[in-house]
Amino acid sequence: MVHPEYTRIDYPSVRQLTMDIGVLDRGKHYTRALLEVDVTDALEKIKVARASGQKISFLVWFIKILADAVSRHPPINGIRHGRHQVITFSSVNVATVVEKKVNGTAVPLPLLLRDVNNRSLEDIEREIHSAVSQEVREAENLVLGEGFNPLLMNLALALPRWLRLFFMRVFILDNPRRMHDTMGTVMVTSLGTIGRISGWIIPTSMHPLSIGIGSLTKKAVLHQGTIQKRSILHLTIAIDHDVIDGMPALKFVDDLVSKLELGIGLES
């Protein structure tokens, strides 16, 4: 609605779930790290692969490498259960976000990529491309790639927030297997390539591991003894301290950064 003194933006009801995540995030004991990762070599390898006809995007490769690193450090792929247990999984389910138009308004909708550590780059690329192309009807597509009962979705969105959050905690967040199957253990949010802002993003999440892919910029750095202009990725990592302690978390981060900087998995 347009008024001479203001404009009202009517968000679709599915955006209530985005606000719910903000509430749930406040209950997590996250330890966060802001990193600068040199991905020059990886980008060059992706460029060479594309020239040879392979359809590989940086985001898809990043998600694949992330899942492989997570699988090598079992505590990071775990969900807390009760007071003294963490349940870990052999498969890595990664949630990401795709912006879609819902009733004419751009809304971020989740896409759950299952068993990423055991899949190929091409397979993951096809699933993300399918989600980007998917037609969205508000009550049926709260999670891309999966159909939901519209009546149940409308009922959930009609509930007051406190009751909706209660059911989410009891039936999903407190059940490790159900959470792994419906939401995954890892969340990846990306700024994309919009604008020229250089910096990090601090994502909100309810996952044990949350990754924010910030800007990718050229920066003069010392590389192999000389000053070079390199492609630097601003990366935020948020780890639930209730799931993993500092030293194993540091080993995971070191493994991930090493794989990203070497361009692992992009060898021709």
Image (spheres, grey):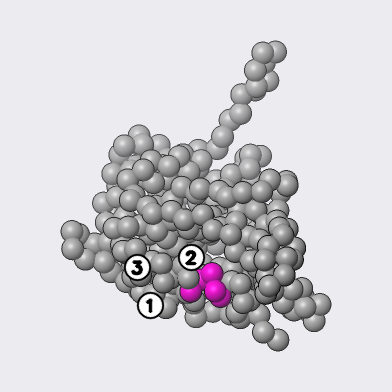
Residue bearing the label numbered 3: 247
Residue contact between numbered discs 2 and 3, judged by CB atoms under 8 Å: no
Displayed quadrant of residue 55: bottom right
Image quadrant in which the N terminus is located: top right
Magenta highlight on residue 31: no
Residue contact between numbered discs 1 and 3, judged by CB atoms under 8 Å: no
Does residue 195 appear in this view?
yes
Distance of mark 1 from mark 3, alpha carbons?
A: 21 Å
Residue 71's disc is: none
Residue 94's disc is: 2
* Residue drawn where x is 32% and y is 45% of the image: 27
Q: Nearer the viewer, residue 114 or 185?
A: 185
> Measured from the top left, where is residue 87 in percent x and y?
28, 69
Q: Is residue 202 left or right of residue 22?
A: right
Residue bearing the label numbered 1: 90
Q: Is residue 128 left or right of residue 188?
A: right
Q: Is residue 240 left or right of residue 146?
A: left
Q: Residue furthest bottom?
A: 268
Classify mark 2: residues with Cα within 10 Å, few (<14), some (14-19) or many (20+).
many
Q: Nearer the viewer, residue 35 or 91?
A: 35
* Residue drawn where x is 38% and y is 66% of the image: 249
Q: As shown in the figure, which amino acid type bears the numbered disc 2?
A: Val
